[in-house]
Amino acid sequence: MDLIDRYKEVRQRTEKICFYLQTEDYVVQPVVDVSPPKWHIGHVTWFFETFILKPYFMGYQEYNPDYNYVFNSYYETVGTRVIRTDRGNLSRPTVVEIYSYRKYVDEAMEGFLSGGVSNDVKELLILGFNHEEQHQELLMTDIKFILGHNPLFPAYNKNYAAPHIDEGVNDAFVSMNEGIYEIGFTGDGFCFDNELNRHKVYLNAYQISPKLVTNAEYLEFINSGGYHDFRHWHAEGWDWVKTNKVEAPLYWHLIDNEWHNYTYHGLEPLHLKGPVTHISYFEAYAYASWKGLRLPTEFEWEAAASKFNWGRRWEWTESSYLPYPGFAKAPGAIGEYNGKFMVNQKVLRGASEVTPPGHSRATYRNFFQTNLRWQFTGIRLAK
Amino acid sequence: MDLIDRYKEVRQRTEKICFYLQTEDYVVQPVVDVSPPKWHIGHVTWFFETFILKPYFMGYQEYNPDYNYVFNSYYETVGTRVIRTDRGNLSRPTVVEIYSYRKYVDEAMEGFLSGGVSNDVKELLILGFNHEEQHQELLMTDIKFILGHNPLFPAYNKNYAAPHIDEGVNDAFVSMNEGIYEIGFTGDGFCFDNELNRHKVYLNAYQISPKLVTNAEYLEFINSGGYHDFRHWHAEGWDWVKTNKVEAPLYWHLIDNEWHNYTYHGLEPLHLKGPVTHISYFEAYAYASWKGLRLPTEFEWEAAASKFNWGRRWEWTESSYLPYPGFAKAPGAIGEYNGKFMVNQKVLRGASEVTPPGHSRATYRNFFQTNLRWQFTGIRLAK
Amino acid sequence: MDLIDRYKEVRQRTEKICFYLQTEDYVVQPVVDVSPPKWHIGHVTWFFETFILKPYFMGYQEYNPDYNYVFNSYYETVGTRVIRTDRGNLSRPTVVEIYSYRKYVDEAMEGFLSGGVSNDVKELLILGFNHEEQHQELLMTDIKFILGHNPLFPAYNKNYAAPHIDEGVNDAFVSMNEGIYEIGFTGDGFCFDNELNRHKVYLNAYQISPKLVTNAEYLEFINSGGYHDFRHWHAEGWDWVKTNKVEAPLYWHLIDNEWHNYTYHGLEPLHLKGPVTHISYFEAYAYASWKGLRLPTEFEWEAAASKFNWGRRWEWTESSYLPYPGFAKAPGAIGEYNGKFMVNQKVLRGASEVTPPGHSRATYRNFFQTNLRWQFTGIRLAK
Amino acid sequence: MDLIDRYKEVRQRTEKICFYLQTEDYVVQPVVDVSPPKWHIGHVTWFFETFILKPYFMGYQEYNPDYNYVFNSYYETVGTRVIRTDRGNLSRPTVVEIYSYRKYVDEAMEGFLSGGVSNDVKELLILGFNHEEQHQELLMTDIKFILGHNPLFPAYNKNYAAPHIDEGVNDAFVSMNEGIYEIGFTGDGFCFDNELNRHKVYLNAYQISPKLVTNAEYLEFINSGGYHDFRHWHAEGWDWVKTNKVEAPLYWHLIDNEWHNYTYHGLEPLHLKGPVTHISYFEAYAYASWKGLRLPTEFEWEAAASKFNWGRRWEWTESSYLPYPGFAKAPGAIGEYNGKFMVNQKVLRGASEVTPPGHSRATYRNFFQTNLRWQFTGIRLAK
């Protein structure tokens, strides 16, 4: 596919996600980790304008210098950042104005791309595509959070085609041999800087489950008092449970003694055979501990990835998010992309039901703080 | 004017205020004291539905029982309250849906009123009118806060007819004699329960200014270091200044060494002859203290109110908001209207440029916490 | 009594209070409102050194300039203040060192006083005596808080002679006539600046109880669900109850289904006939509201004070702490004594079982924030 | 050395550390991570009583059941824990009482040990020795924090024999080959569970500095604006710098334009040739990033440890604190020792000037949160 087509495809996918929103849904920010949809659609546009059009498209006229301030997610390299907690207080620019901004930038981009681009620009462009795909995933989970925390529990889209997943039962663990494995991206395609460099790690023999933990299995943990027994939890996880009075995964609601789950269709009875999701790392760890098992490291996961199906849930690993040997930040604002988050976060591997097709790969490293639950996070066990 | 006409007039005035809003402006809640406009327009509608239609209009069909939960501002008397800080996270019901709700209730109300009403209902109705007028004032100040805290500083309405106020200079203070004065509402019209009962107070001789403190005068306080000299401030006010790094009234911005002021027209150079506004009680007190003067009590204000023009600013008084002798709460939810706020707040007297015409009177008691600034608050001095 | 004897008497009374403390008890500060005993005994000494010895005693050698920093409770007028929350982190100067400081200042004071003093100094001296008496009262309540929040519930002094108080039952209310009353201090003795000037107030007819509310009566409020019914509470009080999960007065403990009370003797069964104490204004108000009665204003209290016994509990009034007409702060640091606290606090009248004999009087105005409970606060009803 | 002698030696070392304290110094807790010395000396005693005397010494009479509540640092396994923030509010039991408790337990232990012990008990005993040694180190750093945050800056002991350390300059980095290394404890002596099991890791070729970063070198970072340039910091580190207004290592004070350092001798001019200490992981990372280098991983550190001197500073590594392959918690309360902290902390390697002699080893793993600075933490660079 040529670059213009790829550009259009990525951009349209974002707008298709937003098709089901009311104007009001674009505006709110219920918690600091969730951004208002209108910020997402402005920010991904600002990315192309700032890193491609302004430096490389001769004669390009910036749409509105104030937008740099409003849609920036970076540190001082590119102007002063809007404090992240404030995004939900901004009613202006309006959704219509942001779509005009999108249109303006899209037209400029198409003009620019029709002239052919250098390899440097092509690289930035592909980064921009992948960046927008990451925000598509965030858009989906942020929308779920916004609607799923409304007391009216509105559906996002009654006809949303959710993947129907029934996990197998008691599938035998896959055995992996002790030895040296190569980890990290290799090949010609795109990868993020945090997947480089490919390097050797030494792994002890281990076993890893070919299936994810199901809602039914997780329910056993709840029913056996898992949220009330400190022995399964990290000290910090136990404080989190107590402080937030956590009793179940996010979006679970006990109504008339039956567990329900908020989905893109609204509230539904819990699908017991499906993989548990919307749990924090603390919960994933506690569940594994209660089972007498553990989470895999990200290296164990990657080394065994070809042996199981993945891609329906982001899977918490035991690994902290750290640089690979030889990791180096790119110069300038692009260099802030990944490196500055490499502390106090856990690596997730895989992909989720809202990850754009083709976006993830076996070497892909996602990462979140240990208490966060608004992504489609799940549990794969190892021993 | 008959009740139907009065009803329509009040309701239309609310909608006229919102005419200049974009849908997004209806949604946000930048701080806990500011409610989203869409909440206001739903809440005042809920008031008529809950206190008039449901108990008194036989066969009335409630619009949506969930709205009781979303638009309630009362305690447990009428269902469980939405935590006030959450209002800004609710994208649904949408603005369009809330206007449908308004229309539904308006039609029901007009049907109901056309049948004639008892004196009891008439009293509730007039309370509903005054309640909606209070929310019209809040709508105006909440809108100002929402737009005035947006980094784009959008105008509410470029053609908004702001009252042009030039305060006089050095007008002689009015002298009032020592003696007994009668305080509180008397007459046939409407008043809030907190203006009753009319009762006697004994006042020492005092003098009160016929004019409000101007921006020019307040600027002298700033320029003489008033915000940096603890001697003028209450201990709690000084903590507030330090913690919040307060240096000027709300909406003042020093741009290229010139003071500007955010107004309904957007950012404008400060109008020096106009009365200072958007200051906290702490600032009003400190200014008076710096001048070697003081704020009047609410009784001094009321006793002298016929001697000066008032109605352009809410004026902080030295009086705490307390019940008058013989004050009694009405039974039921209506009883929560005023009494439960009678602690740790200060009385303001007068009215402001956004108070609906005819809404205030010389016995009217407004009240806010000592740190709040988003109302059109001003300073009148006494000695 | 001459000034030297009065000086010695006041100073020894402080040391007698501390006689029962362990060194460790002098050090801790469990909450911000409670000061460590060692701070109290240093601060009252610093007061005499700073306001009398340094300005008036020729050739006086300051004990240690650093102590000015450590024992100051005032704003910038006298050096930089230690942030109040930090007092409990200071292990040095030690208790022994502070007693040496006391001794040094006492000897200097006795030398100074033996030479005779001017009227100005005499006035400051008497202020110093009253200041130390106020801190004696605080010492007693702070000690109670420190020991009463220790899980071992140690007694302060098993032989402490607590006043035995049995309140009467159903005593008829005292009726007071409508009219003008004079309020405020008059006479030759000492009073604080906040008791001046004596001035007229107009009171409606009212009735006031000659007795305090008892523990037995307050228990009825608890047992009838008073802490769970929002209708009795101010909005702010209700938030306070919910946030702090308040279910009973401070120091009450339900052990094996029987109410106990922490006293200077340790934990004891609740004395039902005694006056309830250690309640906040919010609770006093809610109790009165539940009874269908109200708290008196400070003026009603003072006008009727000769008709009932008082002096065993500080009694919450409905009055906010505000300046009397003509109130003026003294110049300099002494001027910070009272005026800067005249916002968002309530007046208490009377005295408590730990008030030094002769310290209070019918015009005395004590004041605290509406949520505080560590003083011996009680309830007298009015209607 | 036999067990009784070893027991006595460890116990006496604790008391020797406390010899220089005033009673008041035992009591305070300025921040949550610092425990009052009296808690430490009670807690290590409680450890021997709870895990050895009570289960294994027939007829042992518990000293005081309440002490279990006061001196416990464990979760619900051994009774209800005192909330850690409360330790500084407890004036009782007094220091004298706690020393009596120590004496009682010591006598019982000596009686018990004179009878000979099983291997199981011997293992617990040696854990108890190492546990007390860890608390000796904490005692020293907690004492430094308590005295070093007192505005009088008292010395701990003017004759304290601080190790005089001059780091070399520009020492060539040590080169290490790519390959498989064995990591973790091996041998017969004691180690903590987190040092097991010994296992293979694959390391890329790397270089590691034989010296620590000095105060002089760190000063260059400060003087070049290192604390004001976001590019060197993790996003979370940058927030920490801004929120806490960090400008230099803990205990550094700029007085009359010269840097001073609080030490056990009191305030002293900064020793430029000594290794920088009392820095957070965030600062260590930012310094390395500013130098264009990085911190070693804990595996790189351990593999190279024989090539350089270590033991004067705890050295931050890039490694997160995670379980080694095959890590398993011991059953019961002892199992809470290490595992529950294995999240969101960084590994430190080495030892510090206050680590008891013989306590550490090359496989020893210490760990702290990334923002903590009260330990003697330093920087070793790698590339």
Image: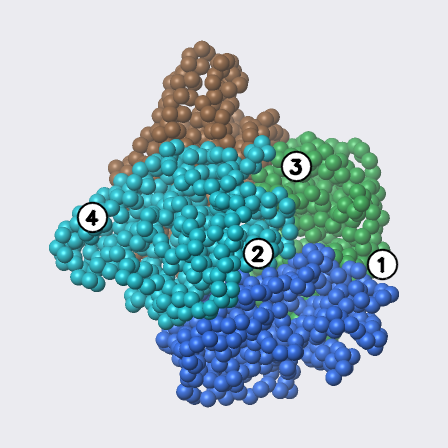
Chain colours: A green, B blue, C cyan, D brown
* B7 relative to C231 in the view: left or right: right
- Callout 1 touching callout 2 (CB < 8 Å): no
Indicate the secondary structure of the residue bearing disc 3: helix
State which chain disc 3 sits on. A
Residue drawn at the location 35% of the way across and 30% of the way down: D96
Label disc, if present, on residue C293 of the rendered structure:
2
Q: Quadrant of the C terminus of chain C?
A: bottom right
Task: Tell me if mark 1 has few (under 14), some (14-19) or many (20+) residues whose alpha carbon lies within 10 angstroms of its own.
Answer: few
Label disc, if present, on residue A228 of the rendered structure:
3
Residue drawn at the location 44% of the way across and 34% of the way down: C266
State which chain disc 1 sits on. A
Q: Position of residue C201 (x, y in %)?
A: 44, 69
Q: Position of residue C241 (x, y in %)?
A: 58, 51
Residue drawn at the location 53% of the way across and 83% of the way down: B310
Residue D335 vertical position relative to residue C322 in the rendered view, above or below: above
Which residue matches tag 4?
A: C5
Which residue matches tag 1?
A: A158
State which mark lies toward you, 1 or 3: 3
Indicate the secondary structure of the residue bearing disc 4: helix
- Residue B79 sits in quarter: bottom right
Of label 1 and label 3, which has the lower sequence position? 1
For badge 1, the amino acid type reads: Lys
Q: Are marks 1 and 3 on the same chain?
A: yes
Which of A145/D362 is in front?
Answer: A145
Q: Position of residue C345 (x, y in %)?
A: 46, 60
Which of D271/A245 is in front?
Answer: A245
